[in-house]
Amino acid sequence: MKSNREINARTGLLGLLGHPVAHSVSPYLQNHLAAICGDDLRYLAFDIEDEEALEDAIWGAYAMGVKGFNVTVPYKKAVMDYLEQVEENALQIGAVNTLKREADGWYGYNTDMPGLIRALHYDKVQIEGKKVVLIGAGGAANAALCAVLEMGAAEVLVLNRTRTRAEQLAKRFIVKYPKSRIRTRGMDQDFVGCMRESGTDWIALQTTSVGMHPDVNGLAITEDDFYKLLTVGYDIIFNPAETAFMKKVEAAGGRAYNGLRMLLFQGIRSYEIWNGVQIGDEAAEELLQGMREQIGK
């Protein structure tokens, strides 16, 4: 990996838009990818505290020739108002996390979905033909549901505190994926019994923020009988490295993973979009270790 690269008049600029961004690991990831690829690029984080300043930031950056952006909370939906074109998956998910500068304006993409797909493949978690339970129906759940349906899940059960929101999420995808069975339940209902109707061997994707640092003991679902039905549990949270959800999955005999690889691969996909390249898995472990160290700071 190259180091101590000098900035010059030809150095390209990439960045992150969101609030807050001070603890993001994206600058570490993207700057190391640029070094690995030998590209003369730098990636910075820009904290946009007020949504009213978002439009000025986007078009000011465009005027200055910024190559692209990642977009994080709370602007993944708001940024769509300023885009010339949005890819189909991002429209389906309803959120954009990657902007690429084009001659006629900004183009928008969602790399959360392909990032999760690549992470699941990387961890050898087979989704095709399997039963998947999705915990949560918020923004992250949109990308997760799109991912598992795209990978050919036979059945998906969407669980949320309020069933109405789970139903709203399911309706957005039923038409596009008619071969997959999508059901919904509220967490105040007998969702364990609903799962048992289809048997055991479920794969769970935990998409809520419950259990994230500093509330490391939080659990969206506490029932032991739920975890006994799982063979795999995937938590999108990556801090802490082992969440309370993961501990429950492992205690019941299942395999458990955190969201760091998803974060890695969605970042890699953004870099590929900006630069028209394909990046293999060779550097993944080195980058993952560095990301773990950054999170631990």
Image (cartoon, helix red, strand yellow):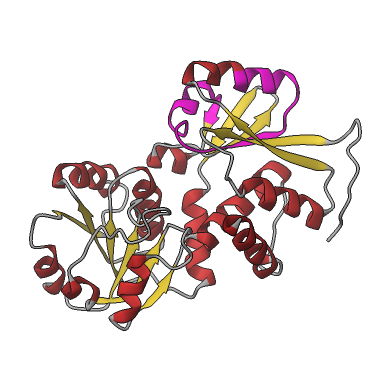
Residue 44 place in picture, x, y as percent = 69, 37
Q: Is residue 86 magenta?
A: no
The residue that appears at 52% across and 35% down in the rendered structure is 20
Q: Position of residue 262 (x, y in %)?
A: 51, 58
Q: Position of residue 234 (x, y in %)?
A: 39, 66
- Residue 59 drawn in magenta: yes
Total marks drawn?
Answer: 0
- Residue 77 drawn above or below residue 117: above
243 and 16: which is toward the camera: 243
- Determine whether 102 is above or below 238 in the image: above
* Image quarter hosting the C terminus: bottom right
Q: Residue at left 30%, top 73%?
A: 248
Is residue 83 placed above or below 203 in the rendered structure? above
Work out which quarter of the rendered image holds the N terminus and state it.
bottom right
Image-based side of 56 in relation to 161, left or right: right
Q: Which residues are magenta?
A: 57-85
Dividing the picture into quadrants, the one containing residue 254 is bottom left
